[in-house]
Image (spheres, rainbow, N blue to C red):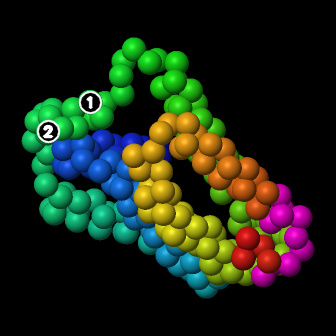
Amino acid sequence: CAGYIAPAQAYGVQITGGKDRASLFAWLQVATNVGSMGGAFLGGLILDSFPFAAINLTAGAICALCAAVAWLSLPVPTPGAVAANPGNAATARPAASTGAPVAALLALIGMLLASRMVLQVPFSLYMTEVFGARHWVAGLTYGLLACGFVVAAPLWARLFENRMPSYVLGGSVLISAACVLVTYLAGSTSSVAIFAFL
């Protein structure tokens, strides 16, 4: 269903009263991708030694544990927490009158997620068929991809926080161009070490 991140962001904004949303979203990205780092490697190790069903059972047990921890430990947000913080009331929700930019941003976010999924789905097949890598190597390499999010998200949040929208947009375009170049180089190499580094 892949519906966890957006509710987690909305929940975080409610809990924090809308303060420091850039930092909050960056750390949510870090937390999510720390899971991807460890999970991909663990999944590769499991698949090298056990049948595929063992991965599903392990993932299901981890999800159940996460649900229990969240249910027992996270606070219940108070209604109107964002509205109760007048200093951030203007930044707590997007202006309704700017429908076109919001729609464009949503479309861009959708395309970015799609670009990640296009890479994610055949990743393991590419690693095993092109490089002849074992599953743990594929998991480790995918974990390195997640490591990029873990390292970069807080840095980008600090760099772009409280900047003019034109500055953020220009930076985003440059970052996207760099991602295009790195993806092209990764797709054209025949070395698993260079691929993992990229």
Q: Look at mark 1 in the image and give the residue it sits on.
A: 90
Label 1: state its secondary structure.
helix
Q: Is residue 75 left or right of residue 191?
A: left
Report the front residue among 52 and 35: 35
Residue 135 in view in this figure: no
| Of the pair 193 and 41, the residue shown nearer to us | 193
| Residue 155 among magenta residues | no
Q: Quadrant of residue 104?
A: top right
Q: Give the prevailing secondary structure in the magenta stretch.
A: helix
Which residue: 66% across, 44% down?
Answer: 173
Residue 188, x across and y down, in percent: 89, 64
Query: Seen from this angle, which residue lies furthest top?
Result: 97
Give above or below for 174 relative to 140. above
Q: Is residue 192 magenta?
A: yes
- Residue 120 in picture, x, y percent from top left: 66, 57
The local crowd at label 1, few if under 14, some if 14 to 19, many if 20 or more residues have their Cα within 10 Å, is few
